[in-house]
Image (cartoon, rainbow, N blue to C red):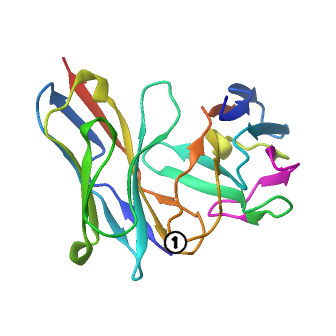
Amino acid sequence: AQSVSQHNHHVILSEAASLELGCNYSYGGTVNLFWYVQYPGQHLQLLLKYFSGDPLVKGIKGFEAEFIKSKFSFNLRKPSVQWSDTAEYFCAVTPKAAGNKLTFGGGTRVLVKP
Amino acid sequence: NAGVTQTPKFQVLKTGQSMTLQCAQDMNHNSMYWYRQDPGMGLRLIYYSASEGTTDKGEVPNGYNVSRLNKREFSLRLESAAPSQTSVYFCASSEVWTGIDTGELFFGEGSRLTVL
């Protein structure tokens, strides 16, 4: 079975700082990769996804993620964060064509100070 | 459109009591899911329904049962609640179950359950 590791549990930043959240997965085959975000008091929503092609994918709100196959990583980045980026971020993976049984990482809580 | 709606949003139970979490989606999605979210553990799949009429166990099914009542509704039942089931429960849906480019789930707002 696949697993997902998010190395940072809590991150505190000031506005305009750059953000990078690590995500590594373990699975030998091809996968679909996702970042979901949960803003305070809201439901989880999709931030971005990678299925194939260009390993640098762009999502909503200025976020991007890079898939590095050799490192089994899918790190999330944002060059300049805003207070409104305060949220919990989840990395998720599912093997291709194996159904929507997403495996989620433990999440990273990000607090952006104004 | 409401998307995915869960009820109740909050519930406190005593050990041994039973309850059902209700979930409905209005997006005409084929697949539905129940996850639980615990601090530091992310979301773990309890049960899923790939299509109307089918249900299957996920990663942590023990202590739970599900019913796919129709295409819209997918309920989660705790027959005899235990403190270990204290968690936030999320229902989700997706357009399809399988395919090369699947994986986008649409989540409800969550149901916070406390078992004393």
Residue B115 appearing in the image: no
| Position in image of residue A35 (x %, y %) | 38, 50
Q: Quadrant of the C terminus of chain A?
A: top left
Residue range (magenta):
B57-75
| Left or right relative to A35: residue B18 | right
- In this orientation, which residue lies closer to the viewer: B74 or A57? A57
- In this orientation, which residue lies closer to the viewer: A2 or B4? B4
Asked if residue A20 is among those painted magenta in the image, a careful observer would answer no
Circle 1 SS class: loop
> Residue flagged by tag 1: what amino acid is it?
Ile
Q: Residue at x 68, y 26 (%)?
A: B9
Name the image quarter holding residue B16: top right
Disc 1: CA contacts within 10 A as few (<14), some (14-19) or many (>=20): some
| Position in image of residue B6 (x %, y %) | 71, 33
Task: Give the farthest residue toward the bottom.
Answer: A28
| Position in image of residue B114 (x %, y %) | 66, 32
Chain letter, disc 1 residue: B
Q: Residue at x 25, y 22 (%)?
A: A83
| Position in image of residue B106 (x %, y %) | 58, 44
Residue A37 appearing in the image: yes
Q: Residue at x 82, y 64 (%)?
A: B54
Query: Where is A42 relative to A63, above or below?
Result: above
- In this orientation, which residue lies closer to the viewer: A56 or A76? A56
Name the image quarter holding residue A56: bottom left
| Left or right relative to B70: residue B4 | left
Q: Residue at x 64, y 39 (%)?
A: B86
Asked if residue B71 is among those painted magenta in the image, a careful observer would answer yes
Residue assigned mark 1: B100
